[in-house]
Image: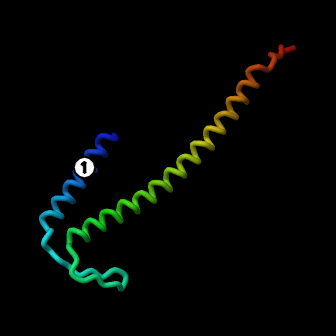
Amino acid sequence: MRFIGLVFVILVIGFMIGFMVLNSQARVDLDIFGHRIFDISLAMVCFYAFVAGMVFVLVFALADEIVLRSNLYRMNKENKNLKKELDALRNLPLEEEK
């Protein structure tokens, strides 16, 4: 699965580089939250958008990883307690029926 993900990332980066090379001469004006930037290369806009997307994905992936690790820790702790309880039940002396 990691190999497929790596191939996908390489393809996306390749397509992005190809798009940037094909549009290296294009110049655009950019308006971001009221702040205007004039005469910037379209390739740079694409690059910054790609980097911003990677940062957002990283933040959400880290948050998800923290949640998953905390759940794993909690479940491992519960599993350890259940094993202790099971061992205690196994070691109880057998009672004979009268």
Relative side of 53 to 96, left or right: left
Relative side of 3 to 56, left or right: left
Q: Position of residue 66 (x, y in %)?
A: 53, 51
Q: Position of residue 65 (x, y in %)?
A: 50, 50
Residue visible at 45% across and 59% down in the picture: 59
Relative side of 19 to 60, left or right: left
Residue visible at 31% across and 46% down in the picture: 5
| Residue that sits furthest to the right in the current view | 98
Q: Which quadrant would the C terminus be assigned to in this image?
A: top right
Relative side of 48 to 98, left or right: left
Question: Vertical placement of 11 versus 25: above or below?
Answer: above
Residue visible at 19% across and 57% down in the picture: 15
Label 1 crowd bin: few (<14), some (14–19), many (20+), radius 10 Å: few
Of the pair 81 and 55, the residue shown nearer to us? 55
Q: Which quadrant would the N terminus be assigned to in this image?
A: top left
Residue visible at 30% across and 67% down in the picture: 48
Question: Vertical placement of 80 versus 42: above or below?
Answer: above
Of the pair 87 and 43, the residue shown nearer to us? 43
Q: Quadrant of residue 74?
A: top right
Q: Quadrant of residue 56?
A: bottom left
Question: Vertical placement of 13 versus 39: above or below?
Answer: above
Which residue has dot 1 on it?
10
Residue type indicated by callout 1: Ile
Q: Secondary structure at mark 1?
A: helix
The colour scheme used here is: rainbow
Q: Position of residue 63 (x, y in %)?
A: 50, 56
Q: Position of residue 16 (x, y in %)?
A: 21, 59
Of the pair 4 and 82, the residue shown nearer to us? 4
Counting every numbered tag in the picture gives 1
